[in-house]
Amino acid sequence: MWYIHVQHLDIVDNFPQNLNVAFQDEESLSYELKHMMLCSLYLLLSGFYCLSSMSDSLGYMPARNYLSSVGTVVLGFLVLLINKGDTVDTETGSQEEDFLLQDEIYKSRLASIKREEDTFMRERDRYELEKGRLIREMKRIRDEDGSRFNNFQILNYRYALLNLLGKGGFSEVYKAFDLVEHRFVACKLHGLNAQWSEDKKQSYIRHAIREYNIHKTLVHHHIVRLWDIFEIDQNTFCTMLEYCSGKDLDAVLKATPVLPEREARIIIIQIFQGLVYLNKRNTKIIHYDLKPGNVLFDDFGVAKVTDFGLSKIVEDDVGSQGMELTSQGAGTYWLVLHFFS
């Protein structure tokens, strides 16, 4: 009986080595769980085989066969349980890998969508700027078609009108060519309303002449030069100014609302140099209408202050009587407030 029992135990002893075939993935289950299951299986099968051996020695063949069958069933059940655990762990690991992969795919797609959005936003801003430029050009063409000077005549036997640059309340500005000095100039045409009273017309002319008298003496690198003034007819006169082919500061700020600090600083320095020049003259002048639309740029990007229609002459007398306003109006402090806000 003992020999039979030992023989059965030898079979059981070799079972864990044969059972390891079921563990195709050694890392799918923890070492402790495998060890516990193998020990439990070893003890259970040892008991079954001992009982089977005892039944065999006592001649109880049905009992022996029954116990052997039960042991085989238990063995198969445990092997299936272990394989199922391996399969579950494998499937769980595969799901985690799929989740991580999908997460990376979605993150990559989100980054791609953000890049496309940035591209679309830049394109939209570019189209908005182009739209504004085309609207201004359409307005310029409309104003030019409605101008009485759209036949591009030669004024004062010297200045050939080329194209309309802009139109204000009572004035139009044309690009012209000086046939004597052979240079481009800005021709500002001042029109008096025919329905104005004579007193209002004389007041307007008086202020324009005063502006001319102030402006014609100003010679500075950052102030637009005034070249000439003459009468066209009873209700129209013309001033010839230095032509600045660049944009004005208002257009620059609309295209780039926030300028880089270095660029803004050099613009402010140029404007201040012009203002310092006005203040150091024997007859000091206050511009009184400093705004982006009155700061022009030439071919080289040099900033120049223009439009002295609201400027004040500061006489030697102290007080408000020492100031003479060239034109009625409150003026503006927009430019300085804009840069330092």
Image: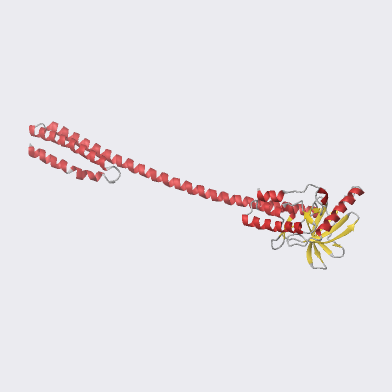
- Image position, residue 242 (x, y; %): 78, 61
At 25% from the left and 40% from the top, the residue drawn is 79
Look at the picture and state if 196 lies above or below 160: above
Chosen colour scheme: secondary structure
What x and y, as percent, mark residue 170? 83, 51
Instruction: From the viewer's side, name the closer residue of 103 and 49.
Output: 103
Nearer to the camera, 179 or 102: 179
Q: Is residue 265 left or right of residue 224?
A: left
Left or right of residue 31, residue 119 in this image: right
Q: Is residue 100 visible?
A: yes
In this rendering, does residue 324 appear at all? no
Q: Is residue 74 left or right of residue 108?
A: left
> In the image, what residue occupies the spot 8% across and 37% down?
2
The residue shown at (65%, 56%) is: 265
What residue is shown at x 8% (from left), y 39% (from top)? Answer: 3
- Quadrant (top left, top right, bottom left, bottom right) of the N terminus: top left
Residue 264 found in image quarter: bottom right
Count of number-bearing discs: 0
Query: Camera-side residue: 267 or 235?
Result: 267
Locate residue 177, reporting x and y percent: 80, 64
